[in-house]
Image (spheres, rainbow, N blue to C red):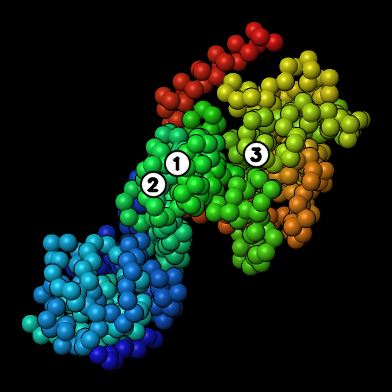
Amino acid sequence: MATTRGNASSVVGAVSPRASGLSLAESFLRIPPFPGSKIHRLAADGPRSNDVASIAKDLRRLRVGGTYWGAQPELPDGCLIVRTAAELELARQVGGDSLVVLWTQSSAEKVSDPRVLNISGDCDPWHMLSRAAGLVTTPDDELRLVAALLDVPVNLLRAGELVEDSTGHSELLARHLPSAFENPFTGQAMTAREAIELSGFWRQLIDSNREIVGGLGFAFWKQEQVGPLLWNGSDDFRFLRSASDVAPEGSVAIWRAKASSEQIAKLEGAGTRLIEVEDGFLRSTGLGADCIPPMSITVDELGAYFDPSRPSELERLLQDVSFGDELIERARELRQTIVEAGIGKYERGGATLERPAGDRIHILVPGQVEDDRAVQTGGCGLTSNLELLKRVRTEAPRAYILYKPHPDVLAGHRRGAIPDKIALGFADDIVADVPINSLISMVDEVHVNTSLAGFEALLRQKKVTTYGVPFYAGWGLTTDLGPVPSRRCTKRSLDELVAAALLVYPRYLDPISGLPCPAEVVVARLAAGDASDPGLLVGVRRLQGKVMRRLRSLVQ
């Protein structure tokens, strides 16, 4: 079944998908059907790239094109892939003793033959052909291009006979690859290489989810946003009601704070691998406690990023990974955009503030939710906002200390309130309703337990002191008074920290297109104020918070 390949350096002919009878939506390079996505194609009309060798190399490297998000069934080495039942008998003439895999679009073509492995539906063509001895198909099948790129011999069914396919990938690229591409996030034109890289980004995300069989502990109001980021390429992501719904094999993504200890114990007892999911560091233009869903999440197979008792994937990135110049430059530009736009985890913008105490050192102390897991684990025994204030005053007796209660506590949803009279025994001012970005810009230092405000202060190149062990402690960027694990011994630059924490580690969902996206897209949306209407549920939660605050004030 040897096949002669075409010259990879030849120019791709100027045949648009429409001119060749291929619709833009069905082009070889297309967007995976992520749940809830609003945009479904990359293809556009326009001039075709003539850099065929580079395009072919990038497609091979990233293994994208066709239904690359599809299933990856187990296959034996050296099998013969046959695309329709009509080709089976002819295929045996060229396949010899190879096991035949009948891979059809519909299970209706299934045959009862012990010598044939029946597979139907969308599968990953790169997986299917990577170890195949050959492919038997029809002339219009886009699998010919994948086979050509992988150097897999192909035989075509023509007029009832099998003919050896000698078409090179240059000609097949002209037939199946769109002539031009449109960025799904901006609507602007992009190059073939950029479209391939974006497809590779999606493939990497999907491949990382293939073993996840469902999610437990996810509030209903965030499932629509989280599902696409955990999608494994098959059906919509499955949110589980209990541990009993879990199949024996596979991993389960958990929002541990909302999953019951009994359910978690049941999963752990069954040997199920648990993957920790939490809000990302660029979250939304509003509070999670108000039921505003996140635009980013973190997904960690080792443990929660805020728990210093054991390594997390974020810690491993910071401790072990070498970041390239291109990634560091992206991190620097992203940091500048975040700072200039005044973007924080829950808000953006903020006015310039006057310093209330002149030349005295001004220190901002952000309060936290006292029963939050980040405080319970990362505080390493320090779980009280009042105790944090006391320690800061002891550490800086002459400083002008501004205490900012956590917005979830102010909203009346969570624990951690300190009566004003007691707080003012250690702080000089309580700044409840002032945007934290404005406060960080105004003060000299930020002192935290484990608050993300410390990370936001680092982005703005402020001095940060940590009393607990947040993820950004221990890398040479902060003054650490908490028990930082000795395993954190690599010194990092600020932009290396940003590269790990904002570019590599989290996952982002574009609120406009509904597609997983790079960090820069979400930052651009936040900077522009592009956010959907929070809806009735948010209003109900905010009203509930007001009632709770009123009740607490009556008790104090």
Q: Amino acid at mark 3?
A: Ala
Question: Who comes first in sequence, dot 1 or dot 3?
Answer: 1
Place of residue 224 in the rendered image (x, y in percent of width and height, measured from the top left) = 40, 40
Residue 69 higher or lower than 289, as above or below: below
Real-space CA distance between mark 1 and mark 3, rounded to the nearest whole angstrom:
19 Å
- Whether residue 261 sits left or right of residue 463 in the image: it is left
Q: Amino acid at mark 2?
A: Val
What residue sits 63% from the left and 13% below the top?
A: 552
Mark 1 crowd level (few <14, some 14–19, many ≥20, 10 Å Cα): many
Q: Which residue is mark 1?
A: 216
Mark 2 crowd level (few <14, some 14–19, many ≥20, 10 Å Cα): some
Question: Do the residues bearing badges 2 and 1 touch, measured as CB atoms within 8 Å?
Answer: yes
Real-space CA distance between mark 2 and mark 1, rounded to the nearest whole angstrom:
10 Å
Q: Which residue is mark 3?
A: 374
Residue 180 in which image quadrant: bottom left
Q: Secondary structure at mark 3?
A: helix
Residue 136 in which image quadrant: bottom left
Q: Which residue is mark 2?
A: 246
Real-space CA distance between mark 3 and mark 2, rounded to the nearest whole angstrom:
27 Å
Question: Who comes first in sequence, dot 2 or dot 1?
Answer: 1
